Image: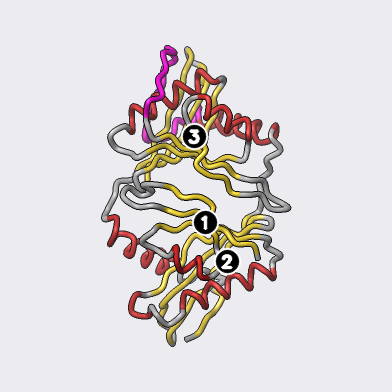
Amino acid sequence: MRYIEDKNFKYKDKMIKHLRDYNAKYTGERDSSTEYFYAIDGEKLVGAVYTNYFWDWVSISSVFYKDIDVLKKLMSEACHYYKNKAVGLKLYTEVESRVEDFKSIGFDIGGITEKTPRTKRYFYLKNTDFNIKSNVQTEVIIVTEKINQYDSILLNKIEKFNRDNNIHLMEERNIMFVALDDNKFVGGVHGSVTEDSMYIGWLVVDEKYRGNQIGKNLMCKIEEKAKELNVYSINLGTVEFQAEKFYEKLGYKIVFIKENDPKGYKSYSMAKKI
């Protein structure tokens, strides 16, 4: 068995296919979509939210709002749109004022990823009751394709928000190791490094080759690389039908647990200082 760093990401597609096929055995095929919510006052954009629906949850990927009333209106519309379809809505942010804004309209803190010497802590916010109501008369347009004139305004608002909150675009470095039996792909691990933090997004081992410590060896390889790059801590997420116990044996600790993510299963946010 050979373990190599796949610097050209030659085996990336195979890794993703293995992971999707494995997950589908437990989750089946589940719907996914992207929606765009634009709040309009007259002809003026006063708020916008971009959402991704995947694995039964609605992730808020981009957001701008003139004030709390507009935010509440946007989230009210999102609740109405996804109710009886999604488990909940979720958002990750490092800005505490945004945390307070979302808490004020009915979101809860579901967990916190601790900071490192060079990165801020992240808050995981969620709403699962879909009872956010708003009587504000602001019109909200819901579409499945971006409206360019509004999208450019949103991007400018996000840039300003980031400047005001000292959020800077950080370079991300992708790392990937694979296990090969002769030249056959039998496993791989992929991580991304931002400043002094690594996030492992994918770890797969061909089912026919499990029980041979391939997963452990791949994790050792990527952890050694993390140390070379002066990474302070590694974070990852896993679902209960994946590898929680495996990661615990490697020294990873549960930071917080997400219920019904995807529906019917718990998922775990885990971390390890190295």
Residue 199, image quadrant: bottom right
Left or right of 170 on screen, residue 261? left
* Residue bounds of the magenta highlight: 130-150
Q: What element carries label 3?
A: strand
Q: Which mark is residue 108?
A: 3
Q: Residue 254 carries which label?
A: 1
Nearest to the observer: residue 183 or residue 231? 231
Q: Is residue 40 magenta?
A: no
Q: Distance between the residues labelled 3 and 2?
A: 33 Å
Any part of residue 186 in sight:
yes
In the rendered image, the vertical position of residue 91 relative to residue 230, given as above or below: above
Q: What residue type is labelled 2?
A: Ile
In the depicted structure, whether residue 225 falls above or below residue 41: below
Q: Rounded to the nearest whole Å, what is the CA distance between mark 1 and mark 2?
A: 23 Å
* Residue 147 image label: none
Q: Nearer the viewer, residue 271 or 80?
A: 271
Q: Name the residue under label 2.
A: 175
Q: Which residue is drawn at 49% across and 66% down?
A: 247
Query: What's the residue type where badge 3 is placed?
Result: Asp
- The main secondary structure of the magenta stretch is loop
Closer to the N terminus: mark 3 or mark 1?
Answer: 3
Q: Residue at left 57%, top 66%?
A: 175
